[in-house]
Structure formats: structure tokens, C-alpha cells
Amino acid sequence: MATSRGFYIGRFQPYHEGHQAMVERIARDVDELVLGIGSADQSHTPHDPFTAGERVMMITKATQEMDLLTYAVPIEDLNRNAVWVSHVQSMSPNFDVAYSNNPLVIRLFEEAGIEVRQSEMYRRDEFQGTEVRQRIIDGGDWQSLVPDPVVDVLEECDGVARLRQVADSDDPEE
């Protein structure tokens, strides 16, 4: 039997329990999963505080106990939607099916002739990067929103202090 391989893209800023739930669902369908780290060229901003390498660590450590072979692949922003899928394909192992709930991503993959499967998002109001990052900035409970290995990665890279610093403003009017 041939190995089936899926592709799931996200910014993973940071990788959180919503991502983990999606990966667990995808694991029921495929033997292997490529996790495309979108906006891999972005870091050290309030929107994208973590580097591609740090996000590779988050994903690798959070998924290592799963019965699913995963590959974390950084995908830099291209800002040219018409060629984005071929860019993704050039940076990734071959895959049979893409997983996304993003309307633009779905459209681009479908136009390229790639099957796209959607999956219901897991507690989307709570498990989203914006909420995790805001809680980190505010000193709230963000740890309950991410897998334990992600907490360890953020401690190792001093990610909490970095996010709080880059989110700070030098504008006295704010």
C-alpha cells in the first residue's frame, strides 16, 4: 500500500492546542504529514514573534509522541498568489492532499488541481494565535492554550520576553 501524505499550513505563531487537534484529526486520514510553516521569513514582530527555527522546534516536539511521521517545512512568503502553490510544492515533500480552512488557500490548491479537505476548527474562539500572543503580552494564562513542549520551547528561546518587548511601543501617546 502506498503511503499517503498530507499538507497542512499555518503560521504557528505559536503552535497551539487548536493546531494539535487539527493534526490529530488529519492523522486519521494520512500516514505522514507535512506542516508548512507559513511566513517563515517573518519574526520579531507582535504578529510574527517567533523564528521559523523556533516554530520547527515547537511542531517537532509537540508532535513527536504521535503515531504520525511529520515534517516541519518553512515556507517563506511569496506575495504572488498565482504561483504560491508551486512555491509550496518546491519547498515541501510531495503530498496527496492539503488541509485548510482558509478560503484563499483552498482556492489556490483547488485551482492547482490538489484535493483540499477541511476540518472543523477546535474551540476556535480560544485556540488561536492572536489570543495566545495577547495573553503572553498581558501576563495571562497562555500555557493552557499550547502543548507542554511549546511552553518549553518558548522558555528556551526567551520567547515571552521577546514578544512583550516587540509588542511594546516607544510612542508616548499609546
Image (cartoon, helix red, strand yellow):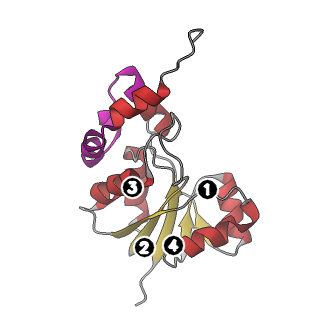
The tag earlier along the polypeptide, 4 or 1, is 1
Q: Which residue is mark 3?
A: 53
Q: Which residue is mark 1?
A: 77
Residue 126 vertical placement versus 82 (above, below): above
Q: Is residue 134 visible?
A: no
Dot label at residue 30? 2
* Camera-side mark, 2 or 1: 1
How many residues crowd mark 4 within 10 Å: few (<14), some (14–19), many (20+)? some
Dot label at residue 92? 4
Residue 139 in picture, x, y percent from top left: 34, 22
The tag earlier along the polypeptide, 2 or 3, is 2
| Separation (CA) of disc 2 from disc 4 | 16 Å
126 part of magenta stretch: no
| Separation (CA) of disc 1 from disc 3 | 15 Å
- Please name the residue shown 46% across and 76% down the image: 5
Dot label at residue 64? none
Residue 25 in picture, x, y percent from top left: 41, 59
Task: Determine contact: label 3, label 4, CB under 8 Å.
Answer: no
Q: Which residues are magenta?
A: 134-158
The tag earlier along the polypeptide, 3 or 4, is 3
| Separation (CA) of disc 3 from disc 4 | 16 Å
Return the residue found at the far top. Answer: 173
